[in-house]
Image (cartoon, rainbow, N blue to C red):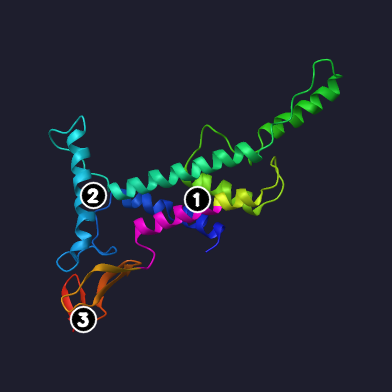
């Protein structure tokens, strides 16, 4: 997947993350629900529950009724992705964004001064400029980075290979986190834990599908509901 495709994943699926924040957890993610057979995955759920309980107990309004808690894994993903993309845009802008044109000296002729000031104002307010205040969201940062990769011109110096590599790394990790949080990417894993027959256990899940485990030794296949083939 290209860098622009990774940025598009964040832009396209950010509303899905916002919707998922308050949605109840659906146990169709990678590895969830196979606890009886895949003990290696239990600590992931336990840590998430413990963290959620810790946050609830430490809240100032902990006693009494509280609204349904946000899904902490989604919130953590959104925070991490937004921080990474905004920081990347901050650093890139600091290196490639031109300083705005200065306004005219007062001793210039009035007509020349007015024309220079108009150009200076247009340059300073160019909507392509990255701003260090105001709108600093993950989708906006992703859009700005996308534009810097695909659009020439503007108040910027050309990107170097190092700039492109930096953006590529941040975009790839951000897209992976979004896809993992929403369970929209196929995943597979071979567990260190072996089946009773001695065979390796391959787990497949993601893309909204029910997770499935397969023993490479005896060929047994099982899901959350139990053994489906042996």
Specify whether 187 is left or right of 210: right
Q: Which residue corresponds to mark 2?
A: 48
**Label 2 or label 3, whichever comes before in sequence order:** 2
> x%, y% of residue 45?
21, 54
CA separation in Å, label 2 and label 3: 30 Å
Q: Is the residue marked by circle 1 packed among few (<14), some (14-19), or many (20+) residues within 10 Å?
A: some
Q: Relative to the observer, which residue lies in front, 223 or 26?
A: 223
**Label 1 or label 2, whichever comes before in sequence order:** 2
Q: Which residue corresponds to mark 1?
A: 170
**Label 3 or label 1, whichever comes before in sequence order:** 1
At a point 79% along the width and 27% down the height, the residue shown is 116
> x%, y% of residue 203?
28, 71
CA separation in Å, label 1 and label 2: 25 Å
Q: Nearer the viewer, mark 2 or mark 3?
A: 3
Q: Relative to the observer, which residue lies in front, 111 or 187?
A: 187
User: Which residue is most to the top?
Assistant: 107
Label ID, residue 218: none
Does the stretch in magenta take in 114? no
Specify whether 163 is left or right of 174: right
Q: Relative to the observer, which residue lies in front, 153 or 37?
A: 37
């Amino acid at each position: 997947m290209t860098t622009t495709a990774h940025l598009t994943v964040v832009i396209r699926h950010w509303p899905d993350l916002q919707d998922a924040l308050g949605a109840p957890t659906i146990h169709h993610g990678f590895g969830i629900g196979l606890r009886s057979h895949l003990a290696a995955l239990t600590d992931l759920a336990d840590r998430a529950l413990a963290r959620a309980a810790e946050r609830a107990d430490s809240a100032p309004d902990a006693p009494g009724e509280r609204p349904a808690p946000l899904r902490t894994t989604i919130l953590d993903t959104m925070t991490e992705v937004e921080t990474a993309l905004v920081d990347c845009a901050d650093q890139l802008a600091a290196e490639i964004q031109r300083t705005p044109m200065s306004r005219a000296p007062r001793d210039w002729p009035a007509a020349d001064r007015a024309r220079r000031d108009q150009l200076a104002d247009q340059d300073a307010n160019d909507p392509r400029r990255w701003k260090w205040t105001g709108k600093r969201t993950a989708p906006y940062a992703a859009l700005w980075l996308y534009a810097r990769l695909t659009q020439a011109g503007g108040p910027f110096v050309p990107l170097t290979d190092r700039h492109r590599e930096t953006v590529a790394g941040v975009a790839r990790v951000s897209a992976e986190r979004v896809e993992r949080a929403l369970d929209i990417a196929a995943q597979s894993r071979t567990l260190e834990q072996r089946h009773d027959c001695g065979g390796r256990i391959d787990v497949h899940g993601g893309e909204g599908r029910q997770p499935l485990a397969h023993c490479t030794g005896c060929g047994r296949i099982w899901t959350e509901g139990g053994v489906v083939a042996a």
